[in-house]
């Protein structure tokens, strides 16, 4: 558990497959940034896999970690990013599998 403005909180990070089934789960303190557990969460990707993640994971290190494994990152750019990356909105729509997983979890 971590302390934030809301009190003691935790954050759940999930990696799901194309059908929304959990592959890997991680729990971090509520005040921890998303990127702190990204590498551990994204280890063991298949080559040529398309990885769709939230813009909270938009960092050069995360993109490099995905590419080093031979996978293709689909990450929307944060509004303050100076170097913009291309990503496909049609592919990013599949991100709803993660949202549905969390809805089932809650």
Image (cartoon, rainbow, N blue to C red):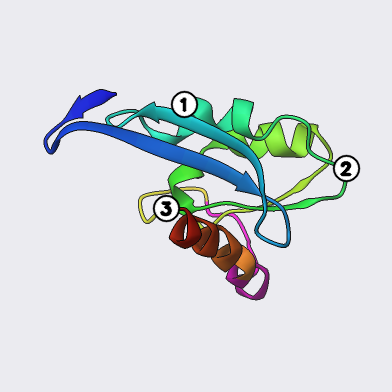
Name the residue rendered at 78%, 31% in the picture. 44
Label pair 2/1, CB-CB below 8 angstroms: no
Badge 3 local density, few (<14 within 10 Å), some, or many (20+)? some
Q: Mark 2, residues whose alpha carbon is within 10 Å: few (<14), some, or many (≥20)?
A: few
Residue furthest out toward the right: 47
**Chain part drawn in magenta:** 84-93
Q: Earlier in the sequence, mark 3 or mark 2?
A: 2
Determine the residue positioned at 71% across, 29% down: 43
Q: Disc 2 to disc 1, how far (Cα)?
A: 23 Å
The image position of residue 28, as x and y in percent, is 40, 27
Q: Quadrant of residue 27?
A: top left
Residue identifier under label 2: 47
Q: Check the image and report above or below for 44 versus 47.
A: above
In three-dimensional space, the C-alpha distance between marks 3 and 1, rounded to whole angstroms, equals: 17 Å
SS for callout 3: loop
Q: Residue 18, image x and y in percent? A: 73, 60
């Amino acid at each position: 558990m971590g302390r934030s403005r809301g009190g003691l909180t935790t954050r759940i990070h999930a990696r799901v497959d194309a059908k929304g089934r959990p592959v890997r789960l991680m729990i971090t303190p509520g005040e921890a940034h998303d990127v702190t557990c990204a590498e551990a969460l994204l280890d063991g990707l298949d080559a040529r896999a398309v990885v769709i993640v939230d813009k909270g994971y938009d960092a050069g290190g995360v993109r490099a970690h995905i590419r080093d494994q031979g996978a293709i990152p689909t990450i929307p750019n944060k509004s303050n990013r100076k170097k913009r990356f291309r990503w496909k909105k049609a592919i990013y729509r599949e991100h709803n599998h993660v949202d549905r997983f969390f809805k089932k979890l809650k």
